[in-house]
Image (cartoon, grey):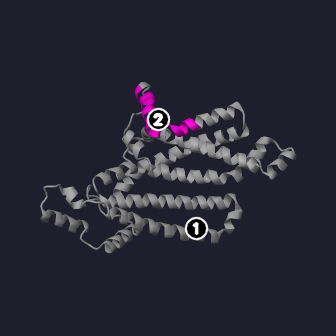
Amino acid sequence: MLSYALRRILIVVITLLAASVIVFAVLEIVPGDPARLMLGINATEDAVAALRQQMGLDQPLVLRYFEWIGGMLTGDFGRSYTYSVPVIDLIRERLVVSLPLALMALALSTLIAIPVGIFSAARRGTAADAGVMAATQLGIAIPNFWFAILLVYVFAIALRLVPAGGFPGWDAGIGKALAALILPAVALALPQAAILARVTRSALLDVLGEDYIRTARAKGLPAGLVLRRHAMRNAMIPVLTILGLQFAFLLAGTIIIENVFYLPGLGRLVFQAITQRDLIVVESVVVLLVATVVIVNFLVDLAYAWADPRLRRR
């Protein structure tokens, strides 16, 4: 298990280095001068040159890359051109919104999807199975931003149960903060739950056709025990894969939902930084999100090895 983990750690390090180079290079070749964009078209050449020097844009690309990546490794993400504050402060401020939102959505998705997938697999070919599959297909087809607007209309405007948008901050109380996040979490969770339920059902059906499952049934074991003890663990690998991908998506891909609900999260920060050409913020946040995706996939690989010891030899 240790050698398996060390191999995966090496892959993580190589992937992160390659991703940092790609992110830096892509943003550097984007047309436009950040200094001139920030100062406006009427800015003098002297003012633009002074700002470029202040931002370090007059230095060689290689030197700028190593300074940037070295700063990130020591916790110094640089200073935002637009907000005039350290980027790490912006990330902390937005992460306290995006991370709880992603965890809430993932928890809701898992709590809904896995029981639904098991229920559907245990009743394959019945009307209940057909109904579940139709519901999950509808959940996949509906855009989450349209679903979010519908939730706002029903629960915030019509019923007035929760706020329609905004985030009061955790200082206002956990209850108020969670109330502001519940609708966005549901809007994110239900489409992901539909995908996860179908994957769970498919994985279970594949496992339930194996010889050892038929042997367990032939011994007279109850169907529920066969599902829990023999089928679920072996069906978890594709489920874990989807869970890892969903967490990465929920943390990094919430730009639309955060804009619908006016949430000051990482998604909106990236969107605002792109429109303002604040390269240091875009680079830092994107690499942080990439690192999150890579580390989550690493943890999923370790979970694979726990679920199926045969994978440790690969």
Q: Nearer the viewer, residue 133 or 287?
A: 133
Q: Is residue 210 above or below residue 157?
A: below
Q: For residue 82, which quarter of the picture?
A: bottom left
Q: Nearer the viewer, residue 51 or 175?
A: 51
Q: How many numbered badges does the structure rendering display?
A: 2
Name the secondary structure under disc 2: helix
Q: Secondary structure at mark 1?
A: helix
Residue 273 image point, x, y percent: 31, 54
Q: Nearer the viewer, residue 230 or 58?
A: 58
When the figure is inspected, residue 281 is found, relative to residue 107, above or below; the finding is below
**Image spot of residue 244 (x, y percent):** 56, 54
Residues under labels 2 and 1: Cα distance?
38 Å
The image quadrant of residue 159 is top left
Above or below, comparing residue 125 to residue 105 in the picture: above
Q: Is 196 colored magenta in this rendering?
A: no
Residue under label 1: 8
- Residue 147: assigned label: 2
Quadrant, the C terminus: bottom right
Q: Position of residue 131 (x, y in %)?
A: 64, 32
Q: Please tell me which residue lies in front, 112 or 149.
A: 149
Q: Are marks 2 and 1 in contact (CB under 8 Å)?
A: no
Task: For marks 2 and 1, give the one nearer the viewer.
Answer: 2
- Identify the mark nearer the N-term, 2 or 1: 1
Residue at figure coordinates x 32%, y 64% from the top left: 28
Q: Residue at x 58, y 51 (%)?
A: 242
- Position of 137 with respect to 268 (left or right) is right
Q: Quadrant of the N terminus?
A: bottom right
Please give left or right for residue 4 compared with residue 92 in the image.
right
How busy is the neighbourhood of tag 2: few (under 14 within 10 Å), some, or many (20 plus)?
some
Q: Residues within 10 Å of mark 1 (few under 14, many from 20)?
A: some
| Highlighted range, magenta | 137-157
Overall secondary structure of the magenta section = helix
